[in-house]
Amino acid sequence: MADGPPAFDVIIAGCGPTGAMLAAELRLHDVRVLVLERETEPVSFVRIVGLHIRSLELLAMRGLLDRVLAHGRRRPAAGFFAAIAKPAPKGLDSAYAYLLGIPQPVIVRLLEDHAIERGAQVRRGCAVVGVEQAAEGVTVELADGERLRSRYLVGCDGGRSTVRKLLGVGFPGEPTRRQTLMGEMKVGVPSEEVAARVAEIRETQHPFWMRPFGSDVYSVVVPAAGVSDRAEPPTLDDFRQQLRAVAGTDFGVHSPRWMSRFGDATRLAERYRVGRVLLAGDAAHIHPPIGGQGLNLGVQDAFNLGWKLAAQVRGWAPETLLDTYQAERHPVAADVLDNTRAQTVLLSDEPGARALRLLFAELMDFDEVNRHLIEKIAGTGIRYDLGAGPDLLGRRLRDIEVRQGHLYGLLHRGRGLLLDRTGRLTVGGWSDRVDHLADHTAALDVPGVLVRPDGHVAWIGDDQRDLDDHLSRWFGEPAR
């Protein structure tokens, strides 16, 4: 590397939801951030994505939820697992127990705008082609020959990640064996006719649906004829041909908003970190979009990594803090990959899979089973392994009521929080990184909790010495 300090603390490759959220999280701690995006313009196709409960909670923690809600459409938190139609379990443990449908370009723009408002720099039309590491930082080479220096680099550049390939990180898993066409388009027949035919077909063809989005626009999902290059988008004729093959009619589809194909490739990066370079989002894991978990998984990666990487840059991170990113998020991604594998089997029209689907439908009539599967997909069932302790340890804390309103309103700055019902605890020399709320009225059944910036519980108890040990574990040495 050339002499002189790096121009940036962190360079992020990719300005999708993961990259934009990570940039905003880093800027909460005054980290100098540059986001490089290969594409010159934001995506234009209007694909609807779903934000699950945990992602909505994270947005609430940073004061972003109201802004996002204004552009989305709520629907019940139900029917996610293999599209088995069961109602949402009662009493889901969240103030945001719904799915929010929102156009993908809109959520990307909102998160990018948020990052820019926080002070992140975003440069479009910048493709990363080279990465060099040294003891003091990373040099990133762009396609036009420009070289940029940073202390860290994070690859958020998608399933075909250039950063991951340049690192030589293995991406084991299964290649695409089946493809599905997905798009939004208008139909030329009455809605009653569409609904009746779709209901009939879905008795045997589960990877197929046509859902109305208002007026005569439908979301269309239909099996593809074979496996093609995903870089080649399907045509309207492809949709018509496959609709006729599956449904016996093409429903007069026309005027598509967008069209794409997706496969069932399932892969997980062997490592999330190589020295000063890390991976997040689809660069670290890909899987079929069953259950709508991909975008949510990436945003949650960013939330887990952001405060830890910021702590490393700011100089107060404990030695092993950054390594907990992979230790916590790699198993979560592995679980998502497994549940999408299972759902893929349940969506097959093979006799054995159809029998298994009927069995799952019966089991989901039990509230505990239905709740477990919904919480798995919604991200609220995650428990990081933080050692032995009460069940709440390592889990996210819901948005409970506190004296000052609601818990998440106290987390907007991305700092840790000691919620103390005893009135005897203190954060002492960690007050520059951890806030303290003494509130005996807080809706908790434990004396005190230490909440990390990502909303997960890092400690439970009432002993100051034990608390100090955990403050050191997660927030480094106290200030003098």
Image (cartoon, rainbow, N blue to C red):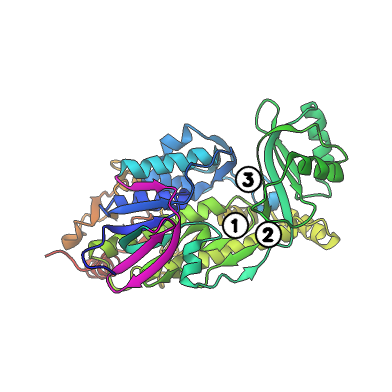
Q: Earlier in the sequence, mark 1 or mark 3?
A: 3
In this picture, which residue range is highlighted in magenta?
119-145
Q: Is residue 405 above or below residue 368?
A: above
Residue extending farthest right: 248
The x and y percentages for residue 472 are 25, 69
Could you say which quadrant of the image residue 149 lies in?
bottom left
> Is 177 one of the magenta-colored residues?
no
Please tell me how many numbered marks the rendered image carries. Answer: 3
- Report the amino acid beneath label 2: Asp
- In the image, is 146 to the left or to the right of 292? left
Quadrant where the N terminus is found in the figure: bottom left
The x and y percentages for residue 360 are 73, 57
> Is 141 one of the magenta-colored residues?
yes
Q: 433 or 421: which is nearer to us?
A: 433
Determine crowd level at label 2: few under 14, some 14-19, many 20+ residues with C-alpha closer than 10 A. Answer: many
- Report the amino acid beneath label 1: His
Q: Measure the C-alpha gap from mark 2 to mark 3.
A: 23 Å
Give the residue at mark 2: 264
Give the residue at mark 3: 78
Q: Which mark is residue 271?
A: none
- Report the amino acid beneath label 3: Ala
Q: Is residue 8 above or below residue 189?
A: below
Q: Is residue 186 visible?
A: yes
